[in-house]
Image (cartoon, rainbow, N blue to C red):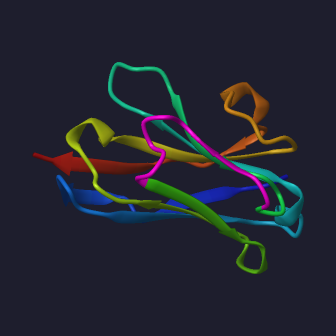
Amino acid sequence: QVQLVESGGGLVQAGGSLRLSCTASGRTFSEYAMAWFRQAPGKERGFVATITSSGGRIYYADSERGRFTISRDNAKNTVYLQMTKLQPEDTAVYYCAAGRTSSTRAGTYDYWGQGTQVTVSS
């Protein structure tokens, strides 16, 4: 069992930056691929970024590539999402997820956090 807790969300002006963190419980964090998804009001949950268990491979959604950076610190059981050049359309609840395989599909992941709200004002 893995429990995930996100933090770092908040209100930011367009063009600003935020760093989200997701800390996992348990001793097997380093065995899991991690990902970030987001869900805006009235929309389906969408893929943002994923990182393999070792951190050796990373993949981003097209709209986030170049603006967002996913990273992990296995010693701290934490995955990060550094977000820059934020725009109002980035407003959403951001979720981290853990799974045995790195994937863009939400169904691949076994464990989810409760989400953290990111609001970008224009």
Q: Is residue 78 above or below residue 9?
A: below
Residue 69 left/right relative to 16: right
Query: Could you tell me residue 111's position as x and y percent?
Result: 73, 43
Residue 61 covered by magenta stretch: yes
Query: Could you tell me residue 119's position as x and y percent?
Result: 25, 48
Residue 73 left/right relative to 95: right
Query: Could you tell me residue 109's position as x and y percent?
Result: 75, 37
Q: Residue at x 33, y 50 (%)?
A: 118
Q: Bounds of the magenta span?
A: 56-67
**Residue 76 falls in which quadrant of the image?**
bottom right
Task: State the predominant SS element of the stretch in magenta.
Answer: loop
Q: Residue at x 47, y 21 (%)?
A: 44
Residue 66 covered by magenta stretch: yes
Front one among 75 and 4: 75
Residue 22 left/right relative to 84: right
**Residue 23 falls in which quadrant of the image?**
bottom right
Q: Is residue 71 above or below residue 58?
A: below
Query: Could you tell me residue 103's position as x and y percent?
Result: 74, 35
**Residue 101 falls in which quadrant of the image?**
top right
User: From this viewpoint, which residue is outermost toward the bottom?
Assistant: 75
Residue 20 left/right relative to 85: right
Q: Residue at x 49, y 34 (%)?
A: 62
Q: Is residue 54 above or below residue 32?
A: below
